[in-house]
Amino acid sequence: MREIRDKVVIITGSSSGIGFALAEEFGRLGAKVVVSARNADRLHEAENSLRSVGIDVFALKADVSVESDCKNLIESTLSHFGKIDILVNNAGISMRAVFAKTSPDVLHKLMDTNFWGTVYCTKFALPHLLLTRGSVVGIISIAGYVGLPGRTGYSASKFAVRGFLDTLRCENLKTGLHVLIAAPGFTSSNIRTAALTADGSPQGETPRNESNMMPAEVAARKIVRATIRRKDSIILTMLEGKFTVFLNRFCPKLVSRMAYHYMAKEPDSPFN
């Protein structure tokens, strides 16, 4: 707690799911939290909820796919709190459609939010994070290690974020900047309800039983702990996460078959 108290933490995509849970956890440990999201109403609800439990919170509407929004998010944080200690690039969208039937616009939307949103926010925050020897955190997914069928744009964007952050860490070996890549498995959140279909429309309903997934609060606690310990990476969930990534190093064809059959079991699977 002493290491995180009074730190200024920016969390993108933090009106719900893992992002909101991260804001709660950082705030519970005494950090000053900046929450942002595209939906103003949900963001306002999140702000009120955090403030009601005594968290020092500043909320700012931002679409991370828009470069000027990212710049404003960083500048507004500096104006409000005077510094930045941790940037958590959490904002993201998913998809559920086979590539052959998917509009290229869908892949553009995923890359704009998941990859470019991370790049933009990190670019503008970096000079200030170097001053505080702070942390850049990227929330990717197991899909950033293993290509998941029906999620071409999602996997591509998460692979890209992992490559970007791995390189950023390497470039800053002697500056004191900490870079963490966090890869949750299936986590209970609203990302699947907002997932894009082949024509770009939201899926609307999750095809999975959310009650069997890791709660967002558990994922958040693990990610915050890894941030405090300045770890390079963390893979969450044993079977879906750590074992899959480990096995993919040695038996990629087997993992591809496993991923296909696993995802094909979803109701109304797009590639059955």
Image (spheres, rainbow, N blue to C red):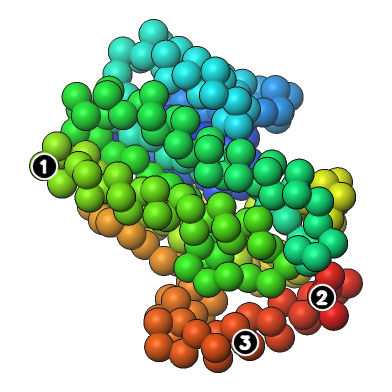
| Residue kind at label 1, given as amino acid type | Lys
Mark identifier at residue 8: none
For residue 205, above or below residue 19: below
- Residue drawn at point x = 81 percent, y = 57 percent: 102
Graded by Cα atoms within 10 Å as few (under 14), some (14 to 19) or many (20 or more), the crowding at tag 1 reads few
Q: Which mark is residue 174?
A: 1
Instruction: Tell me the crowding category of disc 2: few under 14, some 14 to 19, or many 20 or more residues within 10 angstroms, Cα based.
Output: some
| Image x and y of residue 121, in percent | 45, 30
Given the image, on which type of amino acid does mark 3 rest? Met
Tell me the crowding category of disc 3: few under 14, some 14 to 19, or many 20 or more residues within 10 angstroms, Cα based.
Answer: few
Q: Farthest residue toward the left?
A: 174
Q: Residue furthest top?
A: 79
What kind of element bears circle 1? loop
Q: Nearer the viewer, mark 3 or mark 2?
A: 2
Q: Residue at x 66, y 62 (%)?
A: 152
Alpha carbon distance from label 2 to label 1 = 47 Å
Residue 242 in percent (x, y) is at 43, 76
The residue depicted at 30 percent of the width and 50 percent of the height is: 167
Callout 2: helix, strand or loop? loop
Q: Which mark is residue 258?
A: 3
Location of mark 2 (residue): 271
Whether 150 is drawn above or below 29: the answer is below
Q: Quadrant of residue 263?
A: bottom right
**Residue shown at 69%/42% (left/top)?**
109
Tell me which numbered mark, 3 or 1, is placed earlier along the sequence: 1
